[in-house]
Image (spheres, rainbow, N blue to C red):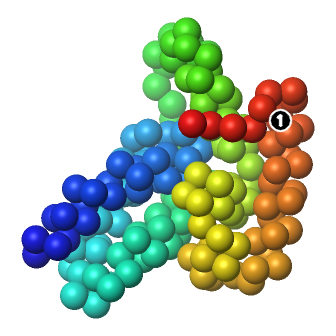
């Protein structure tokens, strides 16, 4: 299963970024769903090795949606860790990235998934539609509404993230 190990070594950081954004900036949840997806992929590797990236993205989007459904039924009690800083450092790009993640976290899960796959994973409208199991028109409308909502949430900030 060397090809699976190679896939994980080469793509795990990009997949973790996707999971992080799909989970609304919750790093622990992103790591958990990525680990679950990779474990699932390992068992199915012979069937999915021709297009593992597409399978992984679809599985991450589904796992993130399922996580939100579970949280809606059984809310988690947050730990009280005192005052949490609003930014993770003084570098402006870190603050911008944090603002984008916070704004994404406020979007509905499907809209968030569309924006993450389109703009952070650079998928086309057709690839995003295939990944999410919806039509291209849905991707276009969710993209339009999602970008408009991001502009409302972020005000004058530029919607870019390096």
Asked if residue 109 shows in the view, the reply is: no
Q: Is residue 151 left or right of residue 8?
A: right
Label 1: few (<14), some or many (≥20) within 10 Å? some
Task: Name, please, the residue furthest toward the bottom.
Answer: 47
Asked which quadrant contains residue 5, the reply is bottom left
Inspect this view and state whether residue 89 appears: yes
Q: Nearer the viewer, residue 80 or 6?
A: 6
**In the picture provided, is 41 more to the left or to the right than 136?**
left
Q: Residue at x 27, y 57 (%)?
A: 10
Work out whether 51 lies above or below 140.
below
Query: SS for tag 1?
Result: helix
Residue 119 image point, x, y percent = 65, 54
Q: Which residue is mark 1?
A: 153
Left or right of 28 in this view: 82: right
Q: Is residue 79 above or below residue 33?
A: above
Where residue 3 appears, x then y in whole percent?
17, 73
- From the image, which quarter does the N terminus lie in? bottom left
Comparing 43 with 52, the one in front is: 52
Q: x, y percentage for residue 75?
A: 57, 46
Q: Residue at x 35, y 49 (%)?
A: 13
Where's the C terminus, which quadrant? top right
Q: In the picture shown, does residue 73 fall above or below 78?
A: below
Residue 27 in the image: state x and y as whole percent.
44, 39
Q: Could you say which quadrant of the image residue 139 lies in?
A: bottom right
In the foreground, 18 or 26: 18
Number of residue marks: 1
Residue at horizontal 80%, vertical 27%? 157
Q: Is residue 75 above or below residue 160?
A: below
């Amino acid at each position: 299963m060397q090809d699976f190990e190679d896939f994980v070594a080469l793509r795990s950081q990009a997949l973790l970024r996707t999971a992080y954004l799909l989970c609304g900036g919750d790093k622990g949840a992103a790591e958990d769903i990525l680990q679950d997806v990779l474990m699932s992929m390992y068992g199915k590797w012979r069937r999915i090795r021709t297009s593992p990236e597409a399978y992984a993205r679809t599985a991450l989007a589904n796992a993130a949606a399922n996580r939100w459904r579970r949280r809606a039924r059984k809310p988690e009690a947050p730990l009280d860790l005192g005052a949490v800083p609003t930014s993770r450092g003084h570098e402006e790009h870190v603050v911008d990235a944090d603002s984008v993640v916070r704004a994404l976290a406020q979007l509905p899960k499907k809209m968030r998934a569309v924006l993450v796959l389109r703009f952070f994973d650079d998928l086309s409208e057709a690839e995003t539609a295939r990944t999410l199991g919806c039509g291209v028109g849905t991707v276009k409308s969710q993209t339009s509404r999602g970008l408009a909502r991001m502009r409302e949430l972020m005000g004058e900030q530029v919607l870019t993230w390096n």
